[in-house]
Structure formats: C-alpha cells, structure tokens
C-alpha cells in the first residue's frame, strides 16, 4: 500500500515522509517513541499537576480575548469534568480553528490556573477529532500516548506531534492486520534469551499499558540491533581470519630481543613484555593480524609498536606508523630515528627512517616517495599523508595506527590497502569501556597494557578558579626554579579555528609581556607552520622554553618527561577523556607532576565532572563516566560511526544484552557461516532486507 492512502497522510505529506526515508508501510517500523504522554481523564487533572498530559473532549465554551496580549480560552469537557486551555497568539486564526461543539485532543502541561479554573492546560499541540469516524482516533484510547521525533522534512510540513502519533498508529494497525510484521530473530534464539516476538515488541513499545511493557519491548529491540551488529562483526572477523593469507614473519627474534633490550635505557614492564609476545605470535602466524593495543596514557605503547615494526623490517618488509597530528608524527619520527640509530650501531644493521607529512617541499617529497617505492627506506612515519594516492610502498608488511580513535574506520582500511594484507596494530590511549570496544572494535583482537612504568608518581590534580590564578602562577615560578617545565592549554572555542587561535594567542602575549616576562615562553597551535611548530617543540624538549602555551594540538601522544605542570584553562569545555589525555602530557618522568584545572562559571554538572578527574587517574573509570555523560557518539570526538547510532540500545545499561547477543551471534556464524541452515533462514532474509551492505561478508564467509 502506498503510504499516501494512510489516514492523515495524502500526497504532500507522503512526499515529506519519503524525504526522511519512509517509502513504504514497513518503513514505519523505524519509528520508535521518543517519549510517552499520559492520556488522562479531566477529573484526575490535579494528580498530574506540572506534567505533560493529553486530554480529549468537546469544546463547551470559548472566551475570545479582550486585549491583544490575552489568550483565546477554550473550555473542554470529556464527560468527567472540564478544564480550561488558554492559547496565546494568532487569535484571529485560532478563533476560526476552534469551534463550539467540536471535538479535540489537546496536549499540554497542567499548571495552576490563572484565569477561572483551578488547574488548566498550557497548550502544546492539538488534534481535531472527526466525530463521524470515531475509529480514526482510536489511538487516544491508550493510557500512554507515544510521541515521535519530528525529523527533517517532517518539521516543514503541517505534521505536528499528535498528528504524527496518529499516522504512525494507523501504519502499525495496517501492518498488524495484514500480518506484515516479519520476525527477525530465530525462534530458538528468542527462547534462549527470553525475548518477546518482533510483533509483540512493536505493539508494546508503541502502545504500552505501562513502562514495564516499554522496557520489555525495548530490550527485545535492542537485542535485535546488537545481534545483527555482532553477526556482522563475527562475519568480518571470520573473513579476515579465513580468507586472507597474511604475511608470516618467521625470522627468529632471539637475537633481535637482545639488541632491542640493550638499546633501551629502561626495563620493559611485565605488561609490555606480555603484549609484545601476543603481537609477535600473531605476526608469526600466517593469518592477518588486526589487533587493538589499549593502554592508558604513558603506559609505553610506542616502544611496543616499535618492536613490532622492527620485527617486520628484520623480515625484509617495510613498516608504517600513522599519527593523527603532525606534531605527534614529528615526535614519533624523532623517537624512532634515535632508537633505530642506536639499534643499527648495536646490531650492525642499516635501517632507514623517514617522515612523511603534508607541506614538505615538493622536490624533497618526491625523493621520499621514490625511496619508499623502491624499498630504500624501512620505517615510514607520517600523518594521513601516508594514505594519499601517490604514496606507493615497496612491500609494506606492518602498519601501526597511533591514537586510532582520532581516525575514521575508512582511514584504517586505506593504509592497509597500501600493502598486501599487512598486519595491523591500532593503538589508543582513550580507554574504551568494554561495552563500546565490543561494538566499535568488535572485529579486532585486543591487547591491554595495564601497568605503568615503575618510576611514575601519581599526578596531583586540582580544580581551581580564575581567582586562584596569582597563586597558580607563583607555583609555576617555583617549579620552573626547580628546573621543571609547564604547559598551559586553552580551549577550542565554538570549534572555530579563528577564535581558538585568538584565545591562545592573546593569552600568550598577555603572559609573555606580563607575569612571565622574564621567562622563555613558546606557543604552538593548529595553524602555526610546521617548521615553526617543530622549532618550538624542539626548544621545549631541550628545555630552552619553560612554558608552552598551546591549544589541544598537544592533546595526544606528546612526550616530554621534564614537564610537570599542566594547566588547563576553562577546563569545563573539554571532555573528560580529553582532559585525561591532556593530563597525560605530564607525569612522564620521575618527578611529582601536577594538573591544574581552571574552571570558569561552573555549574553543578561541570563541577561534578571535573571532580571525577581530580579523584581518579584511572582512565577506564574516567571513560565510563564520560560515556555516561556524553553518549557514545560524542565520546569518539565525532559522530563517525553509523554503527553506534542505535534506536533502542542504551550501551550504558545494556551490557548484558550485548554479551548475550555477541555470544549467540558468534556461535551462529561459527556453526553456519553462510546461514544455510533452515532455522537461520530468518536471519538471512533480514540481511537481504536491512543489511544489504554486509551481504558480501556472507558469500565469502
Ligand atoms: P603512550 O602509551 O602514552 O603512548 P609512550 O609510549 O609515549 O606512552 O611512553 C611514555 C614515556 O615512557 C616515554 O618517554 C617512554 O620512553 C617511557 N617508557 C616507556 N616504557 C617504559 C618503561 N618500561 N620504563 C620507563 N619508561 C618507559
Ligand atoms: Mg602514545
């Protein structure tokens, strides 16, 4: 049936629905109520004071406004009592709209009466009831009326919330009457997880008798979302493991480990050693490695990845390391170069390291590209410049992606394509709550460095205000006297780079000419030229600069152990995980470090958030809190992944559902990778209907 024939729709509104992707009746299944409003009898009105309700009845009186600013007052009777509904504005139009004896449903908030009745309804929306076709407004008979989000094109039409509820009701009614709500989960799985049928879930979530109904239905629909997600992940993982023959790095590492260790000037932690083993096992085998390396800031991931890159190079392949910022790429380039130089001396090898970033001189760049293509260079460190078309590798065998959460999924894939099934290690210091890592990184194997190097002291974190600035600056001077160094970070205001620049730049000048005029103070931000950035960072690293003013460009990865104070201005503007990252720039050496969060006009919630950071340095705890406060999309910085846009799933409370969905889905794919068994037919069909993009996974599974 064309949706234009649905009650309340018609040609024009059907077009609006089409614009938001609702083309056929079945598409209405995507509508999930945003909230529910009590449908009440007017006699009970006082019980619902100060809440939103819906009432329906007959207009028994209308009082027209005497003055311009006064409302039109409608008196509505539903057989149990009457109430007053004042409606402000457009009074001439309104008086035509509402006629005596007409029947209406009204949605509004109950407030203490101002005019004649004790309680009245402050108007939000209305719907005219056709007296002759009562069944048309059957949806008003439910105790809870679903309210749906008016998305995109719908907002520009005459579709209002109550009308939308009515349209959706009729769509569902038709679907149910024609038996067209198709089951998507095999019966055995429903029983196993104790979930209700799709049809029941749709009825219960849209027309519940109470909130228990809503929750039962929501859990079932969340299960469906997570189940299909996990099926896709299971298929992906299987494909990676099964079909792609990867490189096996077979050269013995006994000697390598010896020279590696003698090049280091510290001893590896147990966790680092364990993870290096896990990685090597994968590299040694002939399936393609896809591994996520998680470890809190400062846990020493770089050196682990360097070991793995070295394994690849020692086997005659190239290794690439991709970073999200130039600053970090430059730093890693230095670390890797210095290390490899020492390593070459110890082991008598001749490995070469290059840096590939944007903005390098054309001729120089061409030489770099030539050497990469011809295999003259072995370690290639860079930004996303690495994944540009022109870059060709000789034999890329190993790929590391640092601070993976700053990249999109596509970028990971692109770098990988530069080689022939290279092994991939992605690293992140944003500790990912388990619920998220299972969904977002579900097709990866995970290694965790859960131990910090021994020499670390706990960073002291405090929350201060603008008024404390003089004291803070005195403290800064004391620390500098002891030979330490300081970061001062300013926020990105309104995501606008210009403003961002202004706040850091202005404050830089203020500090340089004011309180710190006898000190060496430098600045880096996103728009400074790369050689200048380089100079500043180098000067800071060598201790020639004592105070570095910056924006969030230093957020990830930067490693300068002598810096012991991190001051974050307007800390309330940052996400908790971001602050944790920034804090991770200090506390990297043996000295006591400090993180000073300066808050401005803090409200209750901001204060609470920032206090979490003062109370713990455990990145996982902080991430969990951050996730709760901001939701998964924000958590990853950008809404980069369609995968996390659930309608019914709430990752904060659906951990149990996720675990069930995951184990059932993975088992199903293991037993029946092409979904050929009759009992899995339901799933296969659903793939054809709603997950077409992922069908290819099944064919090669
Ligand atoms: P992250 O995991 O945040 O990327 P890095 O790899 O930058 O951390 O390491 C942080 C600092 O700790 C670096 O200066 C590094 O040289 C040092 N480091 C790494 N491993 C150890 C260790 N086992 N003992 C002491 N210092 C270490
Ligand atoms: Mg790092």
Image (cartoon, helix red, strand yellow):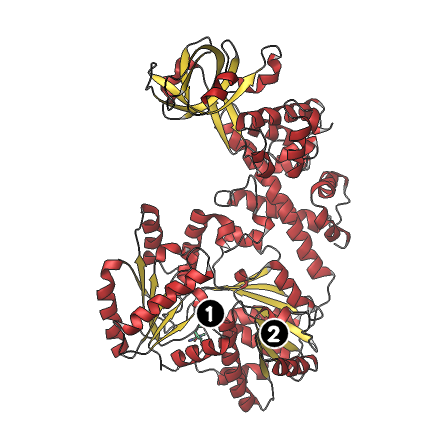
Give the residue at mark 2.
Answer: 320
Q: How many marks?
A: 2
Q: Quadrant of residue 310 in the image?
A: bottom right
Q: Give the position of the C terminus as an image quadrant.
A: bottom right
Q: Quadrant for residue 74, please give it.
A: top left
- Residue at image position (53%, 67%) is 324
Residue 583 visible in the displayed image: no
Q: Residue at x 34, y 58 (%)?
A: 570
Quadrant location, the N terminus:
top right
Dot 1 surroundings within 10 Å: few (below 14), some, or many (20 or more)? Answer: many
Residue located at (41% from left, 10% from top): 81
What label does residue 557 carry, if any? 1
Left or right? Give the position of 594 relative to 493.
left
Q: Position of residue 584 (x, y in %)?
A: 40, 66
Can you say whether 207 is above or below 494 in the image? above
Question: What crowding class fits label 2: few (fewer than 14 Cα within 10 Å), some (14-19), or many (20 or more)?
Answer: many
- In front of the other: 584 or 53: 53
Q: Is mark 1 within 8 Å of ligand 2?
A: yes
The answer to whether marks 2 and 1 mark residues whose Cβ atoms lie closer than 8 Å is no
Q: Is residue 304 left or right of residue 686?
A: left
Q: CA distance from mark 2 to mark 1?
A: 17 Å
Does any portion of residue 365 appear in the rendered image? yes
At which x and y percent is residue 614?
32, 58
């Amino acid at each position: 049936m064309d949706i234009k024939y649905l009650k309340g729709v018609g040609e024009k509104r059907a077009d609006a629905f089409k614009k938001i992707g609702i083309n056929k009746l079945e598409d209405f299944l995507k509508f999930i109520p945003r909230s529910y409003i009590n449908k009440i009898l007017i006699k009970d009105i006082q019980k619902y004071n100060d809440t939103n309700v819906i009432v329906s009845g007959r207009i028994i009186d209308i009082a027209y406004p005497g003055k311009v600013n006064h409302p039109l007052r409608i008196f509505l009777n539903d057989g149990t009592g009457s109430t007053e509904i004042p409606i402000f504005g457009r009074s001439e139009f309104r008086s035509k709209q509402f006629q005596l004896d007409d029947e209406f449903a009204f949605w509004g908030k109950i407030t203490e009466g101002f005019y004649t009745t004790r309680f009245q309804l402050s108007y939000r929306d209305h719907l005219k009831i056709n007296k002759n076709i009562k069944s048309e407004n059957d949806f008003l008979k439910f105790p809870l009326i679903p309210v749906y989000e008016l998305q995109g094109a719908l907002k520009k039409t005459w579709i209002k919330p109550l009308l939308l509820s009515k349209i959706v009701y009729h769509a569902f009614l038709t679907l149910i009457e024609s038996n067209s709500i198709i089951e998507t989960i095999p019966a055995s799985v429903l029983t196993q997880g104790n979930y209700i049928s799709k049809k029941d879930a749709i009825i219960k979530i849209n027309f519940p008798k109470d909130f228990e109904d809503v929750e039962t239905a929501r859990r079932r629909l969340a299960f469906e979302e997570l189940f299909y997600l996990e099926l896709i992940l299971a298929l992906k993982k299987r494909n990676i493991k099964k079909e792609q023959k990867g490189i096996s790095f077979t050269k013995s590492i006994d000697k390598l480990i010896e020279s590696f260790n003698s090049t280091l000037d510290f001893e590896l932690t147990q966790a680092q050693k364990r993870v290096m083993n896990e990685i090597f096992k994968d590299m040694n085998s002939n399936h393609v490695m896809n591994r996520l390396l998680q470890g809190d800031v400062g846990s020493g991931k770089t050196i682990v990845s360097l070991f793995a890159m070295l394994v690849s190079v020692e086997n005659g392949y190239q290794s690439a390391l991709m970073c999200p910022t130039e600053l970090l790429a430059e730093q890693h380039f230095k670390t890797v170069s210095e290390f490899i130089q020492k390593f070459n001396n110890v082991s008598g090898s001749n490995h070469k390291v290059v840096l590939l970033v944007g903005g390098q001189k054309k001729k120089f760049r061409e030489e770099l590209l030539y050497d990469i293509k011809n295999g003259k260079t072995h370690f290639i460190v860079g930004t996303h410049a690495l994944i540009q078309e022109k870059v060709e590798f000789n034999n890329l065998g190993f790929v590391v992606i640092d601070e993976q959460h700053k990249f999109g999924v596509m970028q990971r894939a692109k770098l990988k394509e530069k080689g022939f099934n290279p092994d991939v290690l992605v690293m992140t210091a944003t500790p990912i709550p388990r619920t998220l890592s299972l969904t977002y990184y579900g097709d990866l194997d995970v290694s965790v460095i859960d131990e910090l190097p021994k020499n670390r002291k706990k960073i002291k974190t405090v929350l201060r205000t603008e008024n404390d600035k003089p004291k803070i600056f005195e403290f800064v001077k004391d620390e500098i006297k002891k030979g330490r160094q300081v970061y001062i970070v300013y926020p990105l205001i309104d995501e606008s780079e210009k403003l961002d620049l202004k706040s850091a730049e202005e404050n830089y000048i203020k500090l340089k000419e004011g309180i710190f005029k006898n000190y060496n103070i430098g600045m880096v931000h996103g728009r400074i030229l790369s050689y200048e950035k380089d100079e500043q960072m180098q000067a800071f690293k060598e201790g020639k600069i004592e105070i570095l003013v910056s924006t969030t460009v230093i957020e990830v990865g930067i490693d300068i152990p002598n810096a012991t104070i991190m001051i974050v201005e307007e800390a309330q503007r940052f996400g908790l995980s971001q602050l944790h990252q920034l804090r991770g720039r200090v506390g990297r050496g043996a000295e006591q470090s400090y993180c000073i969060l300066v808050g401005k006009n803090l409200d209750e919630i901001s204060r609470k958030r920032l206090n979490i950071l003062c109370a713990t340095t455990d990145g996982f705890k902080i991430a969990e809190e951050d996730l709760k406060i901001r939701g998964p999309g924000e958590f990853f910085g950008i809404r980069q992944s369609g995968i996390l846009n659930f309608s019914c799933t709430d990752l904060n409370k659906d951990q149990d559902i996720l675990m069930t969905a995951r184990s059932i889905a993975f088992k199903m794919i293991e037993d029946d990778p092409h979904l050929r068994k009759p009992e899995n037919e339901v799933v296969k069909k659903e793939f054809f209907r709603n997950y077409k993009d992922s069908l290819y996974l099944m064919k090669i599974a």
